[in-house]
Every structure is written in structure tokens, then in C-alpha cells.
Amino acid sequence: MTDTHTSLSAPLFEPLTVNGTTFPNRIAMAPMTRNMSPGGVPGADVAEYYERRARGGVGLIITEGTYIDHPGANGYPNVPAFHGAGLEGWKDVVERVHAAGGMIAPQLWHVGRERRPGTEPDADVPGFGPMAVVEDGVEVVRAMTEDDIQDVVASFARAAFEAKRLGFDALELHGAHGYLIDQFLWAESNQRTDAYGGSVENRLRFPRMIVQAVRNVVGPDFPIIFRFSQWKLADYHARIAETPEALGALLRPLADDGVDMFHASTRRMWEPGFAGSELTLAQWTQELTGKPVIAVGSIGLDKTFRTGHFTREEDPTSKSRVDVRQLADQRAREEFDMIAVGRALLSDPDWAGKVRDERLDELIDFDRAALDELVR
């Protein structure tokens, strides 16, 4: 085995301390929806799936999105719940990941206007969002009232309480990709004329309420991660901020309210975040907030992430391509604090350990079959 203190990969395998919690290295598992938790309950196969990546050397596992207990939180079949019977399944996941030497954070999720009537667990419940959505003359998404907003904030707080109670090491709020929190942040999807829409301060009000409520229940020393993105599921070119200054106006208040680390979701983590600057989105986030940042986007593969990989609308096969020197140099230059790896870990649960030991010729290429399996 290569000595990790002298190897090229060493900067990627240094510990990282965030709000008093120390993660063993700089490799995170990115959250990836798997649709393999019938009835909202992650079973033994899901627990083994996460345990296997912990044994493979991942420093922090961020779970797939797991929906909170608000009636409109879920939008997809067979995704895990973070309430009721789902919590017993997550308890097993946490115990097995810890036994394998890993650390884990749930990604707490409300899909907002992405939900449609007919979706489990209650088919009669519509979507909830900043604005109403009418399709074929039927209101399928209702504009959230003040009571709805307070209910969702309380639901996130209850989920955060359970995350700490179950022994998770941190939690992530899903504020990206066009889901509920992001829908309020993005001016395109939030055209409200009340206290929750219009100005940046107003569009931030609901996300800030969530962060504040979560911080209140978990206490001062439990790491809170906030995932954000420019792109949306239906629009790769969408932007919540056109300039670094605009991004700072969105992120700094969230940091002040209790976010300890940001997860800057891009399709290509190495690309400049804004025109006229070489800084990536992760670097801009570091500079604007002073907080550690997880960088993510097509790491370890030769094809850029596209949502079609998960909808089966395109060939998802990708070859493993890891420039360890480049990633390690970026980490050594503090261009990110942690990197999140997604698809590469589906086919190769030992990806992190192989990169650590520079056994790159042993990496297993990502392929379509990995989308339909949990454990390899």
C-alpha cells in the first residue's frame, strides 16, 4: 500500500474539521436518488449499500434525498422517508456505516412543486410551491400560505431533531436543483408579491427560517450543510445568481444563520463559476462566505453529469478518468475543502480507497447496470 503521507493523493486524505466534527478525509459520497425504499423505508439492502461505500474509504456519506414529514414533501416512488417507519431503517443505516468506520449525513428534502397528485404516500395531496401551478385547468401545485410555510419549517426542524437523535454526524438541507427551498431562492420560480417574494431578502426569508429552526433544534455544535445549485432539473442554464455579488447576497445570510458548510452543485466542478473570472463556483463560495465548501460535478468520469443518466433517456456509460495529481493540487491550493463523488461510486464502492492508494488501473468504469443495483 502506498504511504498516504507521501503519495500524490495525500491532500485528498487529510482530515477536515467542521464545527467540531472531524471527517477522516476530503472524499464525500454525493446524494443520489435510488428509488429502492418501498413504502419509504430503507431496508437492509440500502443499509448494506451505504456500509459498503464506508468500507471503501469514503470520508462522508451524504444520503440520497430523504423526505420530511410534511404531506407534500415527496415527489417520487420508492424514495426513503425521514419520519415514521423510515426512521428505523435509517437507524440501521447509521449503525452499519459507523461500524464500518464511516460518517454519514442525511439529505433532508422537500420536492415542492415537483410533486403531482397521485404520488405516494397520499395520492390526494397536491404539490406545494411558491406559486400555484395549473395543468389542463386543474391546480396541481398550490401556492403556499403562511400556515403552509410554518408547517414546512416545523417539519424540517423535526427531521433535524431526528437526525441528531439517530446518531448522524451532520445533516444536509437540499436547497438545489429546483426543489422547494431552491424554488423560493430562484426569482424565476418565485414571483410572489408578499413577504416571501420579490427582493433577495424576501426570497431568502423561507430558507433562512428553515436554517434557523434547524440550528435551534440541533444545537450549536452539529454540522449543517446546505446544498445549492445554479442549474435546475429542467434547465441546465438557470442561475439563481448572475454575479458573485448576487451569490454572496444569497449565501452570506444563510451562513450567518447557522450553515457550517456549503455544497456547491455544478455539472463540471472545474469550470469558472462566473464569466470574467477563473474561480470555480466552489472557490467563489469559499470567498463569499468564509465557510468550507464541497465541490461536485462529474468528478472521476469522462462524461459530464446529465439527468438523463437517471431517467434512462441517454446512454449513461462513462469511463473512470481520475487525474489524482490535478485533484490533489486543487485541494492543496484550497480550491475546495471536500469533493463529492457520485456515479463513480455506484459501480465502484472502493473508488476512494483505490484513489488513495493510487491503484487507478483497478477502477471500475460506471455502467448502466449500476443504476438498477444497490450493492456491488
Image (cartoon, helix red, strand yellow):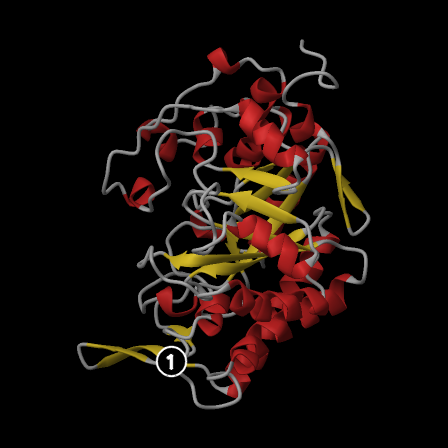
Disc 1 secondary structure class: loop
Query: Which quarter shows the N terminus?
Result: top right
- Relative to 257, residue 275 above or below: above
Please, what is the three-letter code of the amino acid marked with disc 1? Met
Mark 1 lies on residue: 131
* Spot occupied by residue 372 in the image (x, y as percentages of width and height): 36, 34
Decide which of 244, 253 is in the foreground and name it: 244
Decide which of 161, 146 is in the foreground and name it: 146
* Spot occupied by residue 314 in the image (x, y as percentages of width and height): 23, 39
* Spot occupied by residue 24 in the image (x, y as percentages of width and height): 73, 33
**Quarter location, residue 317:** top left
Within 10 Å of disc 1 (Cα), the crowding (few <14, some 14-19, many 20+) is some
- What residue is rendered at 45% in x and 82% in y? 144
* Spot occupied by residue 65 in the image (x, y as percentages of width and height): 50, 52
- Relative to 248, residue 375 above or below: above
Judged from this view, the residue extending furthest toward the front is: 276
